[in-house]
Image: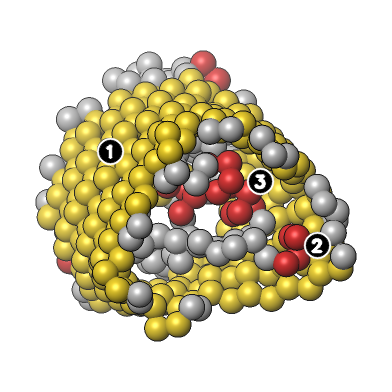
C-alpha cells in the first residue's frame, strides 16, 4: 500500500490494518479507536546503572485515536499516548519511572480522492514525513515488540514525537509523494512554546512496481540543535547555522502470507567544537503467517556512527485469540561496542487489545 494511503488511515484514527470506519464514510461523525498494550519484560539491561534494579519489569501503553469528521473532505484527528516507564527497550538505560503522556498527533485535515489519484493536506502536530516505520508505531501494527535502532524517543535520528507543521501527501497512479515543513528537526522535535525553533523540510516519494511491491526514498534537512540540548556544548556555533541532513531508502513487499520491509538511512549532524556526527542505519524485517491465527516475525538491525556500532536481532511469535487482541512472545539480543553492557538480552510477552466506537450522520 502506498505511504500516503497509510498516512490517511493513521490520521483517521485507525490502529493497525483495519478498514476505514463508517464515521469516515459518512458526511460527518465521531470515531474513537484505542490500542491498549500490557507487557512483562525480563532483561539484563534493567540491572545496569543508572537503573540497577531487578531483571523484570511490567509496563502499559495506551493510544487513543479520536477523529471528528465535518464533511466529505474536512476532519480533525489525533493520537494521544500514555505510557508507563520503562516501556520501550531504549528506556532500560535511563532512570525514568512513573507514567508520561504525549500528543503524538493533533491535526486539521483536508482530503480529496479521485479515480487517478488523491491529495491529503494536514496542519498541526504531525509525525515526521521521514522514514517508513513510523507508519507502524502502533503495537497492533508492529509484529514485534521493539523498534529499529534508528527510531526512538530519546536522542534518536528519527523521533516518535510529533513536530508542528504542515504537510501535503499526493498520489497519482503508481506514484506517491509527500512534503512537510515543520518547526523543528525529526531528530529533536520542539514544542511550539519552546525556544530555538528552526524550519525543517522533510519528504519523500515512492513508486509501486506492482501490487504489494513498493520502493521509496525520503530526506530531511534543517537545524537540529537547541541551546539546552544534551549535546549542545559550550562554544558551539549558533544552532541555526548547523543544518542536519538525512536520506533514506525504503522497500516493502507482500505476497500471500509473507511480508518483508526494510530501510537504509544515512544521517549527518554537523558540529564546530567537536567532530560532526554521522550515522548510517539499516534494518530488514519479515513476517510469515503460518496459520489463520499464528505468525512468526523477525528483524535484523544495524547502526554505525563515529566509531560506535550496534546491531540487534529480534524474533517473535504472534497469536490472535480473537479479532480484538494480539499476543506476542518476543526475544531480542543486542550488541554494542561501547558501554559496560556489550550484549543485552531481552524477553517480553505483550498483549495488545484494540477498541472501537463511532457515531455518524449522513
Q: Nearer the viewer, residue 136 or 60?
A: 136
Look at the numbered discs 3 and 2 and tell me whether their residues touch, using CB distance below 8 Å: no
Residue 173 percent across, percent down from the top left: 58, 33
Image quarter of the C terminus: bottom right
Determine whether 141 is above or below 112 in the image: below
Q: Residue furthest bottom?
A: 321
Name the residue that disc number 2 marks. 26
- Residue at the spot x=69%, y=76% of the render? 357
Task: Tell me the distance, in whole angstroms, between the alpha carbons under discs 2 and 1.
Answer: 41 Å
10 Å crowding of disc 2: few (<14), some (14-19), many (20+): some
Distance between mark 3 and mark 2 Cα atoms:
25 Å
- Asked whether residue 330 appears in the rendered view, the answer is yes
For image coordinates 52% across by 42% down, the residue present is 2
Vertical placement of residue 109 versus 18, above or below: above
Please give the residue where the numbered disc 1 appears in the rendered image.
282
At x 66% / y 46%, what residue is drawn?
Answer: 125
* Front in this rendered view, residue 302 or 235: 302
* Residue indicated by mark 3: 125
Looking at the rendered structure, the secondary structure element under dot 2 is loop
Does label 3 or label 2 sit earlier along the sequence?
2
**Counting residues from the N terminus, which is met first, the one under dot 3 or under dot 1?**
3
Foreground pick, 48 / 327: 327
- Whichever of callouts 2 and 1 sits on the residue coming sooner in the sequence is 2
Secondary structure found at label 1: strand
Q: Which mark is residue 12?
A: none
Foreground residue among 48 and 200: 200
Q: Position of residue 251 (x, y in %)?
A: 36, 38
Q: From this view, report whether residue 139 is shown above or below residue 176.
A: below
Residue at position x 31%, y 56% from top? 258
Which of the two discs, 2 and 1, sits closer to the camera? 2
Amino acid at each position: 500500500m502506498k505511504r500516503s494511503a497509510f498516512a490517511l488511515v493513521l490520521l483517521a484514527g485507525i490502529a493497525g490494518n483495519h478498514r476505514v470506519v463508517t464515521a469516515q464514510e459518512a458526511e460527518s461523525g465521531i470515531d474513537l479507536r484505542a490500542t491498549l498494550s500490557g507487557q512483562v519484560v525480563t532483561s539484563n539491561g534493567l540491572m545496569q546503572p543508572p537503573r540497577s534494579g531487578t531483571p523484570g519489569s511490567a509496563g502499559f501503553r495506551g493510544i487513543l485515536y479520536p477523529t471528528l469528521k465535518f464533511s466529505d473532505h474536512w476532519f480533525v484527528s489525533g493520537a494521544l499516548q500514555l505510557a508507563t516507564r520503562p516501556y520501550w527497550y531504549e528506556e532500560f538505560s535511563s532512570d525514568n519511572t512513573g507514567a508520561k503522556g504525549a500528543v503524538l498527533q493533533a491535526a486539521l485535515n483536508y482530503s480529496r480522492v479521485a479515480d487517478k489519484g488523491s491529495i491529503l493536506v494536514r496542519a498541526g502536530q504531525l509525525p515526521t514525513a521521514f522514514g517508513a516505520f513510523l507508519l507502524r508505531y502502533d503495537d497492533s501494527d508492529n509484529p514485534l515488540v521493539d523498534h529499529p535502532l534508528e527510531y526512538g524517543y530519546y536522542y534518536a535520528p528519527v523521533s516518535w514525537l510529533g513536530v508542528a507543521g504542515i504537510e501535503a501527501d499526493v498520489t497519482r497512479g503508481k506514484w506517491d509523494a509527500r512534503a512537510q515543513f515543520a518547526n523543528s528537526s525529526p531528530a529533536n522535535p520542539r514544542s511550539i512554546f519552546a525556544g530555538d525553533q528552526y524550519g525543517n523540510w522533510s519528504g519523500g516519494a515512492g513508486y509501486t512496481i506492482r501490487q504489494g511491491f513498493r520502493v521509496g526514498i525520503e530526506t530531511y534537512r534543517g537545524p537540529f540543535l537547541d541551546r539546552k540540548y544534551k549535546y549542545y556544548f559550550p562554544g558551539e556555533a549558533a544552532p541555526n547555522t548547523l543544518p542536519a541532513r538525512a536520506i533514506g531508502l525504503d522497500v516493502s513487499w507482500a505476497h500471500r502470507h509473507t511480508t518483508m520491509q526494510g530501510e537504509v538511512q544515512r544521517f549527518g549532524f554537523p558540529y564546530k567544537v567537536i567532530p560532526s556526527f554521522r550515522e548510517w542505519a539499516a534494518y530488514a524485517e519479515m513476517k510469515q503467517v503460518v496459520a489463520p491465527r499464528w505468525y512468526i516475525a523477525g528483524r535484523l538491525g544495524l547502526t554505525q556512527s563515529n566509531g560506535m556500532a550496534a546491531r540487534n536481532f529480534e524474533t517473535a511469535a504472534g497469536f490472535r485469540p480473537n479479532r480484538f487482541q494480539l499476543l506476542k512472545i518476543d526475544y531480542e539480543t543486542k550488541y554494542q561496542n561501547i558501554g559496560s553492557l556489550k550484549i543485552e538480552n531481552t524477553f517480553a510477552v505483550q498483549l495488545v487489545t484494540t477498541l472501537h466506537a463511532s457515531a455518524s450522520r449522513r
